[in-house]
Amino acid sequence: MMIPDVTAENVVFDFNPMISPDREDPHLFYRAARARPVAFSPSIGAYLVARYADLKTVLDDPDTFSSTAALPLIYDNPPEVVAELTAGHVVETRMIVNDDEPLHRPTRQVFDAGFTGARVRALVPLMRQRAHELIDGFTAPCTDLVAEYAVPFAQTVINTAIGFPAEDAEQIQVWTQDFTLLLNPLAPVDGKVPAARRMADYTRYIQALIDDHRTHPRDDLISDVVHGANGLPGLSDDRIHNIIRGVRIAGFDTTRDAITATVLLMLTNPDVRSRIQADPARIIPKVTEEALRRDAPHRGLFRITTRDTELGGALVPKGALLLLLFGSGNRDETTFPNPDSVDLDRPNVRAHLAFGRGLHACSGAPLARTEIRIALETLLQRLPGLRLVPDYQPTYIASYFFRGLESLRVLW
């Protein structure tokens, strides 16, 4: 059988999550992508891997599909952006997700110390306290659960886990948004230049935290990576900068979006809500997993091929960039029957790819699941009459990496 070369064939088969129609509903594109060989997107500049089986092939074969291009490098930006980064002595952005073996494992073992079961359990009282504080601050008769609940809740938890001072939360969020913008190759340059300029302050801020934690260790991620953990020594300062910046994005955006996706699923499915109310301890985890499957908050990461290879019915050349569409794989009908429906008893639901798989599976998955559970159960305890505002229609942020609601307006 002749395997098609996808390079020329698919130039009109494009995907751009920043604009319509892919921004509002990428699943229309995902369904079409799963029905054909692996496709090349001119907007993304990468081959799009949409089928669950193909995603599994890539994630399970790090020798053929390298992670070195998992996230873009900020110094790959246009010259005027790079000039600002250089002037500010901003450290490059090579993060753990970009590491192949043997570099990956020792760094990951130190990093994982920040997200142990004990660490997650220790954060539970803070999660409950923050959820109640935020609900106390809701202004009747309606509120936006994205801006007034999920955002500050997720910020508090990840900032504490990392070791950021609580009083710096607002500024840290600005810097995190700047960093996310610099990673987005589809974002306009005129917004990237001031973002790159502000990264100099972020770099100095993180370095001050590193220096302080070196002298005064705490029970947080910064201390782990500075002093070492799991029998391994601490990391170099440049690696620590990259880890802190990266985990602040990964631990905030995805959790924010997962919380609101789970709440929306409940509020738009009366049967789901009834089952939660009847048995919250057992059903909330089921709702969480089904929401993660249906609306994976992380769109996907990149891989780069180390050799010519066949994937999904197409020839992909050595050095090709691949974008792994986890949200598409999670609705692949060959793995998840009736994938668009809500099924709280789906037997293989935890096979979803919302937290990745294999070498780079998300270390923070237990923390995220705990945050979603506490955010949801606290809302239901405090606001049993919670419901969507009339005529609410979900709209989604323009994001290269994330799939999240712009707002979630509710009454109670």
Image: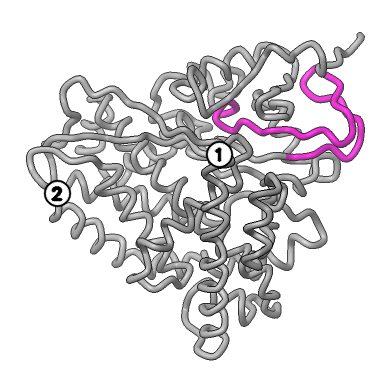
Q: Height in image: 251 above or below 202?
A: above
Q: Amino acid at mark 1?
A: Phe
Q: CA distance from mark 2 to mark 1?
A: 30 Å
Q: Position of residue 151 (x, y in %)?
A: 34, 50
Please report whichever mark, 2 or 1, sits nearer to the chain's N-terminal start.
Answer: 2
Residue 70 appears left or right of 158: right
Name the colour scheme: one colour
Secondary element at tag 2: loop
* Circle 1 residue: 401
Q: Amino acid at mark 2?
A: Phe
Q: Position of residue 91 (x, y in %)?
A: 66, 65
Q: Magenta stretch: residue 181 in it?
A: no
- x 50%, y 89%: residue: 216
Q: Magenta stretch: residue 329 in it?
A: yes
Residue segment shown in magenta: 303-330
Crowdedness near tag 1: few (<14), some (14–19) or many (≥20) residues, C-alpha within 10 Å: many
